[in-house]
């Protein structure tokens, strides 16, 4: 199993493109693997015949675990395989702690005829529920089948798969849905035994990494938060005028990214990273843009954002967001961020705080634009406001530094012509 991202610790095989006995060419796609960030195609490093597959579809293994054997047809590979498996196991095995022998558990005594002589009334036996084939507690199913089951609220563990090795595929989900629709509805009873079924969903590689990295960030980095309210009237007018002549529509998020990049260039302390024994002030302004996907959150990076036009930023964000939703981002496209923007304004969220995205020292949470009463020149008028909250790592950024950055960002957003000066 290759290392496909800087945060990857294990991978899940989604599909094999070759089967045992097939000829494989170096550079030819061998299998698809789900990492913590994306589903990626992995090419073969070697030319030869696929002699052995050690990890089935749906199974997860750690980095450097044996995936397959490629060699000459008829080659005796078993000795080399056993040695490689033994080496992999020994490296992964933690040092054994002293243990006390567990007491032996005796087998249950056989039931005698005398014990069962008296007749016992038996409840009617319910029809058996099909159970999907699994390996190591993980239900084997195609990504499409999992997505369909989740959408329909189906416990995929209750479906019998008809694919290879009992793998659940699309037609199994469709058959289950049609069977459920055709089932007669029981008459209501005075007391309902159960009204809904719990659904346990296996944790994906992406969700595992989100949980680990953000827990480390939240509990390892001392966060503090600074919020400002921004007058958006000029920004709204500027966006309208730009979109009258632009070939592609500029979004408010594009204005936020560009303004943040310009402010970061003036406040390099915010564009920094905590590295344990040193603080790195990053020379480039690379802004990560949080994108919500089906199973979590991905953060593609806009590199050198301070040097790019609004149209360039818009094009890159669109392209990377689409790739993120299709889980086709490369590792390089998600690395190198020095600052992150998380925008929930399109969902009507007025204000929120975000957890810092390592190795950044700060992340900015952007809310929606609200219409509200404001005082201008001593009169109450209708205004348009947007709140942003800066989460700061206090090991790197002090309150005054964060406040000065937000002052600059606010001034640029309230007079967007400043972003090009």
Image (tube, helix red, strand yellow):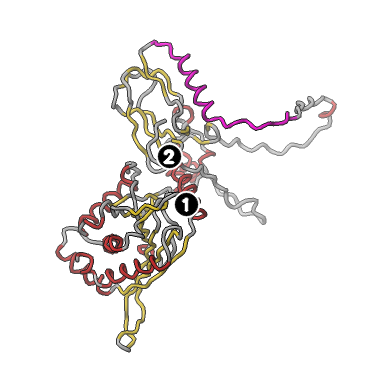
Residue 388 percent across, percent down from the top left: 38, 67
Q: In the image, is residue 5 above or below residue 197?
A: above
Residue 5 part of the magenta-drawn span? no
The x and y percentages for residue 169 are 43, 35
Taking the image as shown, residue 314 lies to the left or right of residue 356, namely: left
Mark 1 Cα shell of 10 Å, populated few (<14), some (14-19), many (≥20): some
User: Alpha carbon of mark 1 to alpha carbon of mark 2: how far?
Assistant: 15 Å
Q: Which residue lies at the image location 40% right of the left edge and 20% below the top edge?
A: 69
In-front residue for pair 95/372: 95
Check disc 1 and report its element: helix, strand or loop: helix
Judging depth in this view, the residue of 8 and 276 nearest the camera is 276
Residue lying farthest right?
114
Q: Choose the circle earlier in sequence order: 1 or 2.
A: 2
x and y percent of residue 82 in the render? 50, 18
Give, as a single range, the part of the protein colored magenta. 74-102
| Quadrant in which residue 313 is drawn | bottom left
* Residue 193 percent across, percent down from the top left: 65, 51
The answer to whether the residues at label 1 and label 2 have Cβ atoms under 8 Å apart is no
**Residue wearing tag 1:** 214
**Quadrant where the N terminus is found in the figure:** top left
Q: Which mark is residue 8?
A: 2
């Amino acid at each position: 199993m290759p290392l496909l991202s800087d945060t990857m610790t294990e991978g899940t095989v989604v599909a094999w493109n070759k089967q045992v006995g097939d000829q494989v060419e170096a550079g030819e796609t061998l299998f698809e693997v789900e990492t913590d960030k994306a589903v990626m195609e992995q090419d073969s490093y070697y030319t030869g015949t696929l002699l052995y597959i050690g990890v089935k579809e749906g199974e997860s293994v750690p980095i450097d675990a044996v995936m397959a054997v490629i060699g000459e047809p008829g080659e005796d590979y078993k000795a080399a395989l056993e040695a490689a498996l033994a080496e992999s196991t020994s490296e992964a095995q933690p040092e054994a702690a002293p243990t006390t022998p567990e007491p032996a558990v005796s087998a249950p005594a056989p039931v005698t005829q005398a014990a069962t002589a008296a007749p016992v009334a038996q409840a009617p036996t319910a029809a058996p529920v099909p159970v999907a084939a699994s390996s190591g507690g993980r239900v084997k199913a195609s990504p499409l089948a999992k997505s369909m089951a989740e959408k329909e609220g189906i416990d995929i563990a209750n479906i019998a798969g008809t694919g290879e090795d009992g793998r659940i595929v699309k037609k199994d989900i469709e058959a289950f849905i049609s069977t459920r629709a055709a089932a007669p509805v029981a008459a209501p009873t005075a007391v309902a035994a159960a009204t809904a079924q719990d659904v346990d969903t296996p944790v994906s590689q992406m969700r595992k990494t989100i949980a680990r990295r953000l827990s480390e960030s939240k509990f390892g980095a001392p966060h503090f938060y600074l919020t400002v309210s921004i007058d958006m009237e000029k920004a709204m007018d500027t966006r309208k005028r730009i979109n009258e002549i632009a070939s592609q529509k500029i979004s408010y998020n594009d204005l936020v990214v560009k303004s943040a990049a310009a402010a970061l260039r003036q406040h390099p302390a915010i564009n920094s990273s905590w590295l344990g024994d040193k603080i790195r002030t990053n020379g480039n302004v690379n802004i990560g843009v949080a994108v919500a996907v089906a199973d979590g959150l991905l953060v593609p990076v806009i590199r050198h954002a301070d040097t790019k036009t609004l149209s360039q930023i818009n094009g890159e964000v669109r392209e990377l967001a689409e790739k993120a939703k299709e889980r086709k981002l490369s590792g390089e496209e998600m690395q190198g961020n020095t600052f992150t923007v998380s925008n929930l304004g399109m969902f009507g969220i007025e204000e929120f705080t975000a957890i810092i995205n390592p190795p950044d020292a700060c992340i900015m949470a952007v809310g929606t634009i609200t219409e509200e009463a404001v005082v201008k020149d001593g009169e109450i008028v209708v205004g348009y406001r947007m709140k942003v909250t800066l989460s700061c790592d206090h090991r790197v950024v002090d309150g005054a530094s964060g406040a000065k950055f937000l002052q600059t960002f606010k001034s640029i957003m309230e007079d967007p012509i400043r972003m090009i000066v």
